[in-house]
């Protein structure tokens, strides 16, 4: 497994733990600040978290909306 694959494994594990914490505590919505293409926003939504994305770049928001049309950006 190379460095990128290892990083992705840890990222997914962290996000899964985070999603579980949010769901267990019932803390409500999660903002993905600096969401870029919306990849993490979509992953969190797939884990059952009520999430939305925010980014300073209108171009990145366009990409996120195009790639993840069912999510809020």
Image (tube, rainbow, N blue to C red):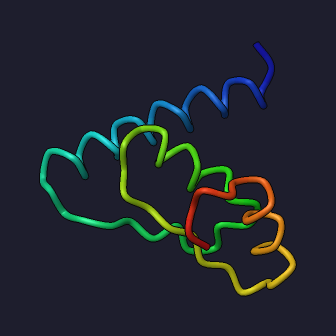
* The image quarter in which residue 38 lies: bottom right
Q: Residue visible at 47% across and 47% down?
A: 44
Judge from the rendering whether residue 2 lies leftward or rightward of residue 13; answer left or right: right
Q: In this image, 12 relative to 21: left or right?
A: right
Q: Is residue 51 above or below residue 20?
A: below
The answer to whether 4 is drawn above or below residue 58 in the figure is above
Residue 55, given in percent of the width and then of the height, sits at 67, 79
Q: Position of residue 10 (x, y in %)?
A: 55, 31
Q: Residue furthest front?
A: 70
Q: Position of residue 16 (x, y in %)?
A: 40, 35
Where is 48 relative to 71, above or below?
Answer: above
In this rendering, the count of numbered labels is 0
Asked whether 56 or 9 is in front, the reply is 56
| 41 versus 35 height, above or below | above
Horizontal arrangement in the rendering, residue 5 relative to residue 14 (left or right): right
Q: Is residue 70 left or right of residue 21?
A: right
Residue closest to the far top? 1
The residue that appears at 61% across and 73% down in the rendered structure is 73
Quadrant of the rendered structure where residue 58 is? bottom right
Residue occupying the point 56% across, 38% down = 11
Q: Position of residue 1 (x, y in %)?
A: 76, 12
- Outermost residue, left side: 25
Is 70 in front, or is 60? 70
Give the residue at x 37% y 43%: 48
């Amino acid at each position: 497994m190379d460095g990128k694959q290892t990083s992705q494994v840890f990222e997914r594990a962290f996000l899964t733990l985070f999603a579980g914490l949010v769901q267990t505590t019932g803390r409500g919505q999660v903002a993905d600040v600096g969401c870029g293409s919306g990849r993490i926003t979509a992953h969190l939504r797939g884990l059952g978290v009520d999430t939305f994305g925010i980014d300073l770049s209108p171009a990145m928001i366009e990409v996120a909306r195009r790639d993840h049309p069912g999510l809020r950006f």
